Image (cartoon, rainbow, N blue to C red):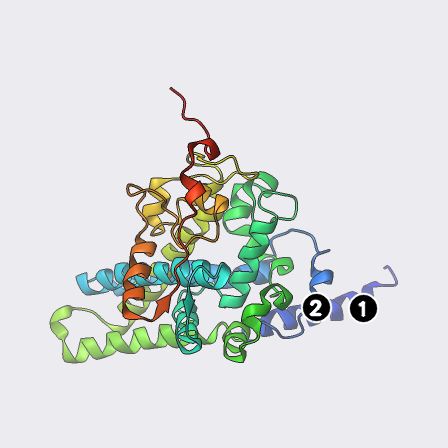
Amino acid sequence: MPASAPTSIPDRVRSLFISVVQWFDADYHTPEITKTAGKPERVEWIRTIPFVILHAGCLGVFFTGASWFAVGAAVFLYFIRMFAITGFYHRYFSHRTFSTSRAWQFVLALWGGICVQRGALWWAYTHRHHHQHSDEEHDKHSPRQHGFLWSHIGWITSSKNFPTDYRRVKDLAKYPELVFLNRFDVLVPVLFAIALFFLGQSLQTHFPGLHTSGGQMLVWGFFISTTALFHGTACINSLAHVFGNKRYATDDDSRNSLLLALITLGEGWHNNHHQHMGSVRQGFYWWEIDITYYLLRVMSWTGLIWDLRPVPIDAYDPAKQIPRKG
């Protein structure tokens, strides 16, 4: 037996302990980013457990059944949470394409927290890193570099991609309330799931005609809706770099797709976004449906957000676009 073997088991146990604690405290014993950068790109089973639980929870439908109210809640929650991801996590926290107050900024982070896609600062850091290295060697989720499945879900199960590099989000990390939500990123989703369960229980007691229950609301409103939300969002990392058309000759494989734009409320105009990432609008033309942009415009009328950054004029210059065939 090798001399190093006796110390390998304690090291593995310690590593396992740290990984489990990080489910509840994402910043617990987080190594320097420079150290994690040298880790191999690989799926780690301890990191897959939350995704297994999420997907397995969908099977609860065989026990709870369905009702029009529960199914409608799942659809509604998919819609408002996809808007939180696209409008807040992406267009605000990642790219700062509009302005808001500190108080409302916290509300946006809370709203994004119920999406179960970790904290706003981790999401923004990861996305900014993607733009810096899009489809290059260091891109965390490039289909070109690592394959389709890795870009869709594999990358997020690697401890290499787990820590938040707060140096890359200094504009956000100066707010302790945002750092708190980012550090304890499991808190909001757990409270959200519990609230859905008790909402279902209350509806069962006071409105039995709805034929719903706590378990039903948990399965449909949380597990099924959240799983669909995750894969819809992940399609931009994977499919939006292999499926669709290019309007601009960017250095990456980003594409425009109406189908993905409908699934993600506007994020499918991915080639547009990679060409002009500072624009709050990603569907540059009237026929490019961008529901997130429409909703952000409505929010701006209330005064909750302002200074929406427009599409640059040169985006419409034919000389800056790839000539259409035929």
Residue drawn where x is 57% and y is 38% of the image = 251
Kind of residue sitting beneath label 1:
Thr
Quadrant location, the C terminus: top left
Q: Quadrant of residue 128?
A: bottom right
Q: Residue 7, labelled with which disc?
A: 1
Q: Toward the viewer: 99 or 251?
A: 99
Res 140 seen here: no
Please, which residue is most extreme toward the right here?
Answer: 3
Residue drawn where x is 51% and y is 51% of the image = 153
Kind of residue sitting beneath label 2:
Pro
Q: Position of residue 1 (x, y in %)?
A: 85, 59
Label 1: state its secondary structure.
helix
Q: Which residue is mark 2?
A: 31
Please, which residue is most extreme toward the top here?
Answer: 326
Q: Residue 262, labelled with which disc?
A: none
Q: Position of residue 65 (x, y in %)?
A: 24, 62
